[in-house]
Image (tube, rainbow, N blue to C red):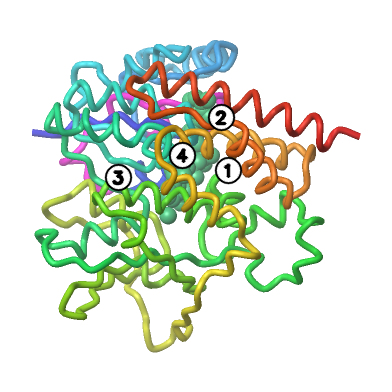
Amino acid sequence: MTRGICILGATGSIGQNTLDVVARHPDEFRVVALTGSTRVEEMLALCLRHHPEVAVMVDAGAAVALREALAAHGHSRVRVESGEEALVAASTMSGVDEVMAAIVGAAGLLPTLAAVRAGRRVYLANKECLVMAGRLFMEEVQRHKVTLLPIDSEHNAIFQCLGDGQGIRRIILTASGGPFRQWPMDRLADVTPEQACAHPNWVMGRKISVDSATMMNKGLEVIEAHWLFSLTPDRIRVLVHPQSIIHSMVEYLDGSVLAQLGNPDMRTPIAHALAWPQRMESGVSSLNLVQGPALQFEDPDFGRFPCLGLAFRALEQGAGAPAVLNAANEVSVQAFLEGRIPFTGISRVVEETLEYCQPGAPESLEAVLAIDGEARRTATDRIRQAFSS
Ligand code: NAD
Ligand code: MG
């Protein structure tokens, strides 16, 4: 029996890495549904190679273009849908047993939550889901007895080192420190989007690349770890490790520290999760510790990376603060990528939005979305007032 898989965000970096692993195991998986947003060429290539039943392009014009392109290639059997409702339909359709949640940002919340509520096995790359709606999301996971497997390399590493979850002193999330770990501080204001997206160790989408450069990515991951592993913030430590060979560690009460190592290639955590509780080939080469770089470690510099401290603060504050943090970050990263604010403006907008918006704990999905919307409007206003020339 093959397992039917839906890949939300199939045209992105995680989506394509997932399809690379899936294609190595044709006896194990059936690609049932793929979703993208606007990139027609990428989706066309994926459809021709993986033959899904359904392909979703959120953008209506892109869906029309994909339908025409598929017809021109004689592949009219792929059903092409568009719109946000089509994402939910794809992640819950019959024939889908498992869902890779790899849409970037808040747009991933609804279809991922729908997959949870439909009881599918869920592979979680979209960390923004848990930052926005951690309590609600994890309650639904429990209610529907969902197997939720972390794809983020750090959380996947911790999951691998956790054993039965007993006797843990703390977890240690490693961070590369991104491209600006050693830049002169006075040059950070002039960083360009291209420089921010040139990560030293990983090839990723643009939003998470900027998040890695500000270290907001690690802050989002601290919040993600809090929800996934039920740990208070004081038991989550961040350690900078520029080589990205150790993907994270668990420290036990007796002083033992278990780490997961491997080449920095997302196909390892993806294959781990897809095969769990077994193991499968991922296409990743063996780690060479003799010829590889020496492993280094240092404490994070909270002065250079204010976003990391803001994320810890939002987690400690609780209630709606993490959802505000996430929304303000998405808006300001987009503004930075479009050249409307400087790199150093990202943390400023997030900080000001957190000060202005102090919502209570959201009790429903609607409440989460309302907090998200309000924080986006506030961040947009801050950008207009502080940065428009
Ligand atoms: P990406 O930008 O390469 O791909 C994003 C995908 O989301 C694309 O398929 C795009 O079509 C889709 N998308 C974008 N906006 C959308 C919208 N409004 N509605 C529906 N679909 C939309 O991003 P990525 O690097 O693959 O990251 C995806 C997620 O995985 C992010 O949450 C990221 O934090 C997480 N993640 C990525 C990596 C990595 O190595 N790339 C590692 C860990 C976690
Ligand atoms: Mg990560």
Instruction: Identify residue type, mark 1.
Output: Lys
- Mark 1 or mark 3: which comes first in sequence? 1
Q: CA distance from mark 3 to mark 2?
A: 37 Å
Q: Nearer the observer, disc 3 or disc 2?
A: 3
Instruction: Identify residue type, mark 3.
Output: Trp
- Mark 1 or mark 2: which comes first in sequence? 2
* Residue wearing tag 4: 322
Membership of 120 in magenta stretch: no
Task: Check mark 4 vs ligand 1: CB closer than 8 Å? yes or no.
Answer: no
Viewer can see residue 15: no
Rendered location of residue 203, percent (x, y): 53, 55
> Seen in the image, is 358 located left or right of residue 306?
left
Q: CA distance from mark 2 to mark 4?
A: 35 Å
* Residue wearing tag 1: 207
Viewer can see residue 343: yes
The answer to whether mark 2 and mark 4 are in CB contact below 8 A is no
Q: Secondary structure at mark 3?
A: helix
Q: Secondary structure at mark 1?
A: helix
* Residue wearing tag 3: 227
Magenta segment boundaries in residue numbering: 24-49
Task: Check mark 1 vs ligand 1: CB closer than 8 Å? yes or no.
Answer: yes
Nearest the camera: 295 or 170?
170
Image quadrant containing the N terminus:
top left
Residue visible at 27% across and 48% down?
24
- Mark 4 or mark 1: which comes first in sequence? 1
* Residue wearing tag 2: 41
- Mark 3 or mark 2: which comes first in sequence? 2
Membership of 42 in magenta stretch: yes
Q: Secondary structure at mark 2?
A: helix
